[in-house]
Amino acid sequence: MPIKACVFDAYGTLFDVAAAAREAAAEPGREALAACWQKLAGDWRLKQLQYTWLRAVADAHTDFWEVTQNGLDWALEANGLQGDAELRARLLALYFELSAYPEVPKMLAQLKAAGFATAILSNGEPKMLAGAVESAGVSDVLDDVLSVQDVGVFKPHASVYQMVNTRFGTASDEVLFVSSNGWDAAHASGFGFTTVWVNRAGEPMDRLPWTPAHVLSDLTTIPDLAGAA
């Protein structure tokens, strides 16, 4: 079936999750963070994701903002920065205004001009997502921002992906789903979406029962891919 809706994961896909630590590290007086910001950003993201998976399997859902804070607290301690309350507050504030990857605004505008429905499907808490969308200036090229808060479980639960079909009245094979997380794209493939893994870091393919239909290094060619599917 032709693609009707192009749906994107938010964090790491449209929005640069390393931006908060990178930008804070560049501020005056942040020498301790500057020495380890890349590791801290990686630790923060990994724990954030791990906590969503653990909460999903344990039926212990909470909002993504709490998970984000929990992940940051672990990362700060792992990097010897746990006593800096001002730094913690600054990093969390920056997470609300993450920058988009450079190709994102043009890519979304091209999709809208071509007549595709566009949306975000994210673990993110609605206020977090609203902040990122506003900061990136892409609200006018998105038809909706879907949060797992509406179903009370994190990805990759099937009920999360079903939110797209419910919202847009699509069959699964009419959806192009794009994620920077290989596991997310893989599970979405299992759900029936046509999928793209945006593998910016050149990582190996996850060993799962399903694989993404396409692998790209950035989002530039998504409009062409959607039109050809």
Image (cartoon, helix red, strand yellow):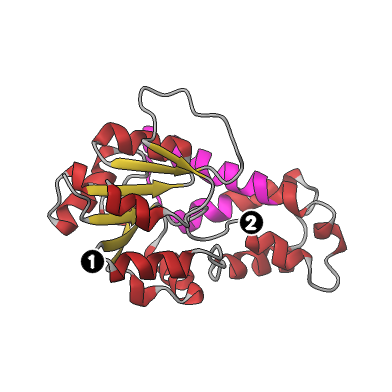
Q: What residue do we see at 47% from left, 23% from top? A: 207
Crowding near pointer 2: few (<14 within 10 Å), some, many (20+)?
Answer: many
The residue pinned by badge 1 equals 115
Seen from the viewer's position, the closer of residues 212 and 207 is 212
What distance separates the C-alpha of mark 1 from that of mark 2? 32 Å
Q: Which residue range is magenta in the image?
A: 41-70
Horizontal arrangement in the rendering, residue 50 relative to residue 115 (left or right)? right
Query: Does 189 lie within the magenta span?
Result: no
When asked about the image quadrant of residue 195, the answer is: top left
Q: Which of marks 1 and 2 is nearer the N terminus?
A: 2
Q: What residue do we see at 59% from left, 35% from top? A: 203
The residue pinned by badge 2 equals 18
Query: Does 66 lie within the magenta span?
Result: yes
Q: Position of residue 81 (x, y in %)?
A: 78, 54
Amino acid type at circle 2 is Ala
**Is residue 63 visible in this depiction of the protein?**
no
Seen from the viewer's position, the closer of residues 14 and 213 is 213
Label the magenta part by its dominant secondary structure: helix
Q: Which quadrant is the N terminus positioned in?
A: top left
Horizontal arrangement in the rendering, residue 119 relative to residue 81 (left or right)? left
Crowding near pointer 1: few (<14 within 10 Å), some, many (20+)?
Answer: few
Amino acid type at circle 1 is Gly
Q: Nearer the viewer, mark 1 or mark 2?
A: 1
When asked about the image quadrant of residue 184, the answer is: top left
Seen from the viewer's position, the closer of residues 112 and 161 is 112
Q: What residue do we see at 31% from left, 52% from top? A: 226
Horizontal arrangement in the rendering, residue 44 relative to residue 25 (left or right)? left
When asked about the image quadrant of residue 54, the answer is: top left
Considering the numbered disc 1 on the image, is that residue within a helix, a strand or a loop?
A: loop
